[in-house]
Amino acid sequence: MKKVRILNIEIDNVSETEFLKSFKSGVLFTPNVDHLIKLRKDPDFMEAYQISDYKLCDSQFVLYASKILGTPLRQKISGSDFFPAFYKFHKDNPDIKIFLLGAAPGVAHQAQYKINRKVGREIVVASYSPSFGFENNQAECQKIVDMINQSGATVLVVGVGSPKQEKWIYKYKNKLSSIKIFMALGATIDFEAGNVKRAPKWMSEIGLEWFFRLYCEPKRLWKRYLVDDIPFVLLILNQRLQFHLNKDLEDSSEILQIVDR
């Protein structure tokens, strides 16, 4: 599978259709602008990212960045689009049994009910909405591990926000022996439950989904979108400049080698 380097990670350059057919096992993360910024500052987050087998572009801005860098990604595949495509693709596959971990109390259970109703079978076998700060509560984390192992699930979807969800998978992955597929999918469980509205499709397609989410949750998201993520454009332009400088140096070196001969 071809990859495209954006800042300090490589993103899989694949279409959703192709990926659905090939995704049989492994860890899936969905990098967006916020991930790329946090990965530069948080070594624990970067360490967690190293266990991901697949990284799909979850941002129209990351897609635009790939074009600026001259290595265009084929498609934006957000987690909230990929997950429904995944469970519909596997609706008749008895080996796919999903555990939902995330969202506020009762929301994961509501998502479980709605997904199973759409699919027409109990494809989501169990769900759990953890308490606030659960990642620091070893007893609750062990309880979650036991619940997942006892559920018979083969797929784990974690939606507790980044970088918490990626770090949790990194820490507990090896204790979940029956799970073949791990997916860190942010607000996807909320979307599936109908607890949070998604941006209109046209806004998502032109890169304005962030604006819609900011409008819906200003207190939670203003700093992320209006402060933390702003340096992204400058970092991409710098990567593009470095590429040209390195290429010029390579070209100069080749010319000198020819002259020396």
Image (cartoon, grey):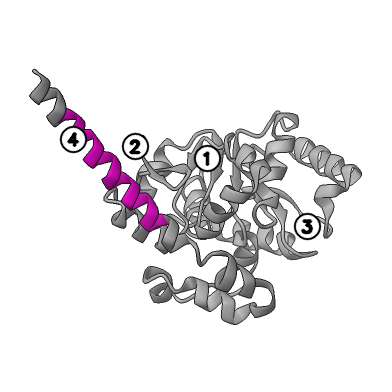
The three-letter code of the residue at mark 4 reads Ser
State yes or no: discs 4 and 3 in contact (Cβ < 8 Å): no
The three-letter code of the residue at mark 2 reads Lys
Crowding at mark 3 (Cα within 10 Å: few <14, some 14-19, many 20+): many
Crowding at mark 1 (Cα within 10 Å: few <14, some 14-19, many 20+): few
80 left or right of 44? left
Crowding at mark 2 (Cα within 10 Å: few <14, some 14-19, many 20+): few
Task: Give whichever of 140, 146 is nearer the camera.
Answer: 140
The three-letter code of the residue at mark 3 reads Ser
Q: Answer yes or no: is residue 204 visible.
A: yes
Task: Give whichever of 56, 180 is nearer the camera.
Answer: 56
Residue 127: percent from left, percent from top = 74, 52
Q: Earlier in the sequence, mark 3 or mark 1?
A: 1
Residue identified by numbered label 2? 2
**Front: mark 2 or 1:** 2
Quadrant assignment for the C terminus: top left
102 left or right of 229? right
Residue identified by numbered label 3? 129
Q: Residue at x 80, y 49 (%)?
A: 135
Quarter occupied by residue 159:
bottom right
Magenta residues?
236-254
Task: Give whichever of 39, 202 is nearer the camera.
Answer: 39
Q: Residue furthest front?
A: 260
Residue identified by numbered label 4? 252
